[in-house]
Image (cartoon, rainbow, N blue to C red):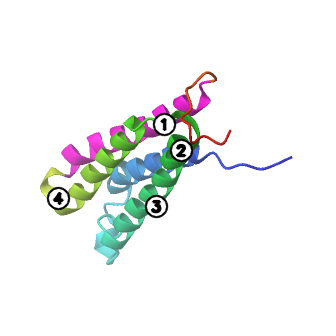
């Protein structure tokens, strides 16, 4: 039995983990700065999560594009969401207004990619090797 990683599921999970971190962590861990621990707005952690989402998402969506559906829509949604996510780092006053569309676009890209890859009668380009 061959083990295969479902990159879309991993990308959706990473996006949800990021959303949970951004939404719930401040609620539960808001007292940590009293003890000198700054995990809520830790720039290194934030950048790490963005890079993780970028690497997993890019690989997953490129694989779906190249091997299955040949549609730029999931890639466009994903990179638009990533732009919002990066802008969130620079415009802290608009963090929520940038985070919500970022997460929605990134998850929508993965869901659309997942569904498009699962269609049995999808069209292939001439460069398809399957």
Residue 47 percent across, percent down from the top left: 35, 67
Q: Nearer the viewer, mark 2 or mark 4?
A: 2
Q: Residue furthest front?
A: 126
Does the magenta portion include 56?
no
Residue 109 falls in image quadrant:
top left
Is label 2 in contact with label 1 (beta carbons under 8 Å)? yes
Give the residue furthest to the right.
1
The label nearer to you, 1 versus 4, is 1
The answer to which of marks 2 and 4 sits earlier in the sequence is: 2
Q: Earlier in the sequence, mark 4 or mark 3?
A: 3
Q: Nearer the viewer, residue 47 or 121?
A: 121
Q: Residue under label 3, please give it.
A: 52
Cα distance in 3D space between marks 4 and 3: 21 Å
Q: Is residue 25 visible?
A: yes
| N-terminal-most mark, 2 or 3 | 3
Graded by Cα atoms within 10 Å as few (under 14), some (14 to 19) or many (20 or more), the crowding at tag 1 reads some
In this rendered view, identify the residue nearer to me: 21 or 2.
2
Looking at the rendered structure, which numbered label has been put on residue 70?
1
Residue 66 location (% of width, % of height): 53, 44
Residue 92: mark in rendering: 4
Residue at image x 22%, y 47%? Answer: 98
In the rendered view, does 11 fall on the left or right side of 39?
right
Q: Quadrant of residue 37?
A: bottom left
Tell me which corner region of the image, top left, top right, bottom left or bottom right, holds residue 108. top left
Magenta stretch in the rendered image: 95-119
Q: Position of residue 82 (x, y in %)?
A: 32, 51
Label drawn at residue 66: 2
Disc 2 to disc 3, how far (Cα)?
Answer: 21 Å
Q: Quadrant of the C terminus?
A: top right
* Disc 2 to disc 4, C-alpha distance: 36 Å
């Amino acid at each position: 039995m061959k083990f295969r990683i479902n990159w879309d599921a991993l990308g959706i999970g990473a996006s949800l983990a990021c959303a949970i971190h951004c939404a719930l962590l401040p609620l539960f861990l808001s007292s940590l700065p009293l003890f000198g621990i700054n995990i809520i707005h830790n720039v290194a952690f934030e950048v790490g999560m963005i890079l993780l989402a970028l690497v997993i998402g890019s690989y997953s969506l490129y694989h779906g594009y190249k091997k299955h559906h040949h549609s730029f829509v999931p890639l466009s949604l994903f990179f638009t969401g990533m732009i919002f996510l990066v802008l969130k780092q620079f415009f802290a006053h608009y963090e929520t207004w940038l985070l919500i569309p970022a997460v929605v676009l990134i998850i929508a890209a993965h869901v659309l990619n997942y569904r498009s890859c699962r269609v049995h009668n999808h069209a292939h380009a001439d460069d398809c090797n399957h």
